[in-house]
Amino acid sequence: MFKRIIQIIVIALVLLVLAVVCGGIVGFNFLRDNGIKQYFATMKPPAATVSTTIVKPSSWTPGVEAIGTVSAVRGVDLTVETAGIVREILFHANQKVADGAVLLQLDDAVERADLEATKAQVAVVQTALERAIELQKRGVNPEATLDTARATATATQAQVAKLQAVLDQKRLTAPFSGTVGIPKIDLGQYLAPGTAVVTLQDLDTMRVDFSVPEQQLPLLKIDQTVRLGIGGGEMPFAGRIRGIDPKIDPASRLVTIRAEVANTEGKLTPGQFVQVRVELPEENNVLAVPQTALTSSLYGDFVFVVRPAKAAEAAPAPAGKPEEKPADKPAADAAKPADAMKPAAEGAAAKPADKAAADPAKPATEAPKPEPELVLSQVFVKPGRRNNGMVEVLEGIASGDEVVTAGQNRLYNGMSVAVDNTIDPTKSANNQAAQQ
């Protein structure tokens, strides 16, 4: 019986120990998970690094942008007027030729022979005309004979002029000075009338044809400045508007504009694709931000404005040994011997005096104030015109706002940020490396 009781007690103790252990494990896991949740819930994410710019009123040069095609003011594909065999090619590719220079000579042996024969006949007819005139003066030649001689002489002269024109068609000459292209024919080749021989382009002055919407037509005028660019955002070429089509295309609602630009360095080529910008009168006090600062979404266009966070509430005193109440201090001091309190009081009073006497000119140093925390504010704006990497902002921001220009990835409203303006996203990396 006694052993039975002992066994029951042992089993009860074992069960109690197991319950305590299991309860401790469960409680530990619960406290650990709860602590982890509270830690991550109160953990402050690190500040994101961004680049910013201060919004300031500036001058703005609006413009009308379009895409144009370059062509030479004087350019033509030269062809032959008559059939023949190529005897001489008197030019080479990319050669600059003068006005009237002979470029191609066809075989003209037959035409030359016909011309020489006709010229010989002219001499005979001219002699007969002179004889008829002399006989008419003597009164022995009728008037009809003289008229016939004159008509024959005139017809013979016309035949000479005709043969000379046919002979001239056997030569291809430059109608104006310019640069010739690659020959499209070979020696000994038979050419039919209208066969293209070579292109001739005057590259000193180029013209650009482009189209703009009808709504922008009132902004354009003859002799307005036009900037041209091949690519990369730069527009180094300047020209003038020389023509505006008086008719708007009813199908596309576009109007064609023609501009002329000097091409002294030869960087523009006929048929080339260019970016065109017609510069309009300059405007002042326009708020603009870099295009990299503007973000578009389904809800609208917005920017991130950097602003200082609100002052944090005063933190409570750190937990520790409670301070003695003023009412308790006299009792505690009274419990101490008078001699023990006197040296301490004298030492406490002497230390500030000694310190002040040792360094009277040095002011008391204050603890450095921490920099104010910066947070983001998402502001929806109304964008306007764009020009040279900048976008006009009509509504939403004011002068003096600090706007994020780079690093908007994974930003959100109220996020803490750190500003680093060592890199300007509005400039190329090469320019920034050169400045450093």
Image: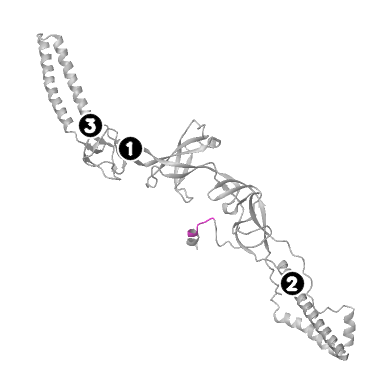
Depth check, mark 1 against mark 2: the one in front is 2
Q: Earlier in the sequence, mark 3 or mark 2?
A: 2
Q: Mark 2 points at which residue?
A: 35
Relative vertical location of residue 78 with respect to residue 363 in this rendering, above or below: above
User: Which secondary structure dominates the residues rendered in magenta?
Assistant: loop
- Magenta stretch encompasses residue 16: no
How many residues crowd around disc 3 within 10 Å: few (fewer than 14), some, or many (20 or more)?
some
Q: Mark 3 points at which residue?
A: 168
Depth check, mark 3 against mark 1: the one in front is 1
The mark total stands at 3
Q: What residue type is labelled 3?
A: Asp
Mark 1, secondary structure of its residue = strand
Q: Which amino acid does label 1 sit on?
A: Asp
Dividing the picture into quarters, in which one does residue 39 lie?
A: bottom right
Q: Is residue 323 left or right of residue 141?
A: right
> Who is closer to the viewer here, 344 or 64?
64
Q: Earlier in the sequence, mark 1 or mark 2?
A: 2
* Image x and y of residue 197, in percent: 28, 39
Say if mark 3 contacts mark 2, CB within 8 Å.
no
Mark 2, secondary structure of its residue = helix
Q: Which amino acid does label 2 sit on?
A: Gly
Q: In this view, does 85 lie to the left or right of 200?
A: left
Please tell me which residue is depicted at 88% across the width and 84% down the height of the picture: 332
Say if mark 1 contacts mark 2, CB within 8 Å.
no
> Who is closer to the viewer here, 357 or 257?
257
Q: Which disc number belongs to residue 77?
A: 1
The magenta-colored residue range is 426-430
* Image x and y of residue 2, in percent: 88, 91
